[in-house]
Amino acid sequence: MPSLYDTSRGWESDLPGNQIPLPHSGAVAVFREGGRNNGTFTVLDVTSGKISWKTEVKSPGIVSAFSVTVQGKDYLVASASGFQGADVVSKGRQVTTIDIFPARAAGDGVKPAHHLELDGEGAVTNGGGGLLVKLDNDVVMTVDPATGATKTYDLRKMKPPASECKLCFASTEAVAVTPRGPLLATDTQPRRHYWVPGGWAGGTLTTNSDHKIFIAPVKDSLVAQWRDEGAPNDTWAVLDPATGKVRAKVECAPDQRVTADDSKGASLSAAGRYLVRSHTAFDLDKGTGHCFEETDQDKPVHLNGVTDDGVAFGIGASTADQADPRVTIDLATGQVQLGNYVVAPFGDYSGYGLFWDDSTNTMVAYPHAK
């Protein structure tokens, strides 16, 4: 483990299932599939490992479980698509169900704060600023996890601002949820044209609005990359989803390996100050960033976690003596140090780091060393 943690203290859990960090609630959830039509949430206090609450979810099909954080509050979501009322004669009615639980609860058999049943088959995902439900190729719905309120959008009727997206063409897709509605994209990934209907457009970010950019949601923020006309470097930035304005940015040497993997491998510190994705790291309070991409002088570092104290975890370039060396980075200085650990935390908050031990299938929590 990284030297940041005191491995002489802490707790562990062998509950089977998928671990879901709940940083704003001081908790971690474990979701276990119980079969084709049900599953169980068990929520543990991150400082003690004690069970705070649990509940069973019943659904019409295989359950997908994840968390979403909106305005500093965590919610657990269970969704599934399947048929209701099927019997030996009838196929039944196809529905998509969504159950939303506030992460802060207590007791057994906790009921969802909101239960939705939608006609047809839908794909429910974390849109960053809320739930994004893709109902078919042209219709999407957003869901506010706090209220359960829904809003439906027909993408065929949503046109980009012509002045900022002259080359928009082909199909339109919803890729995230912002406070002003869905973030839409046209063309093909990873570089597209983006806009929020009636809100803002990605063309305002560049010196040439015809240039396509890359945007991916990370929690309730957006990470963007573009190249200004005639510029030697790429610009990486974190955007405010409500306005499209830049919260922090940094210039990096060109990297052609950007992938449209949404927030895979990205991390936002629990208090929301630091964000890391791929080879970039940002301090959202200072509006600054660091690049750790490969250059003519430097080897690359791939970042995969960050704490509220600005300590980032990453993997450096392999050498003849060491494959995938672990490193830690002080984001205040950008200094990279070789780490003496193998496993990085998948969550760090409330003074504890959460780790997964593959060899024993155990979740382990260690407090920060004093």
Image (cartoon, grey):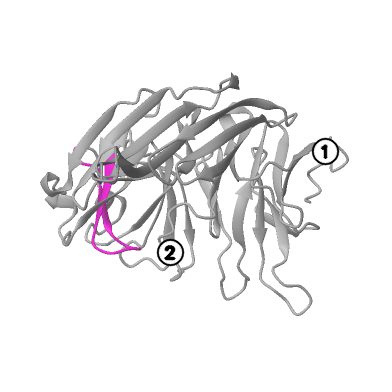
Amino acid beneath label 1: Ala
Image side of residue 138 versus residue 105, left or right: left
Nearest the viewer among 6 and 211 is 6
Q: Secondary structure at mark 2?
A: loop
Q: Is residue 181 above or below residue 186?
A: above
Place of residue 370 in the rendered image (x, y in percent of width and height, measured from the top left): 84, 34
At a point 45% along the width and 25% down the height, the residue shown is: 112
- What is the span of residues highlighted in magenta in the rendered image? 181-198
At a point 53% along the width and 39% down the height, the residue shown is: 286
The quarter of the picture where residue 106 lies is: top right
The residue labelled by disc 1 is 369
- Label 2 packing within 10 angstroms: few (<14), some (14-19), many (20+): few
Examine the rendering and report whether any part of residue 285 can be seen: no
Examine the rendering and report whether any part of residue 364 can be seen: yes
Q: Are marks 1 and 2 in contact (CB under 8 Å)?
A: no
How far, Cα to Cα, is label 1 from label 2? Answer: 36 Å
Nearest the viewer among 109 and 159 is 109
Q: Is residue 360 above or below residue 140?
A: below
Place of residue 71 in the rendered image (x, y in percent of width and height, measured from the top left): 44, 27
- Asked if residue 182 is among those painted magenta in the image, a careful observer would answer yes
Amino acid beneath label 2: Thr
- Label 1 packing within 10 angstroms: few (<14), some (14-19), many (20+): few
Nearest the viewer among 313 and 147 is 147
At a point 18% along the width and 55% down the height, the residue shown is: 165
Image side of residue 10 versus residue 28, left or right: right
The image's mark for residue 80 is none
Image side of residue 123 versus residue 17, left or right: left
> First in sequence: mark 1 or mark 2?
2
The residue labelled by disc 2 is 259
Q: Is residue 256 above or below residue 263?
A: below
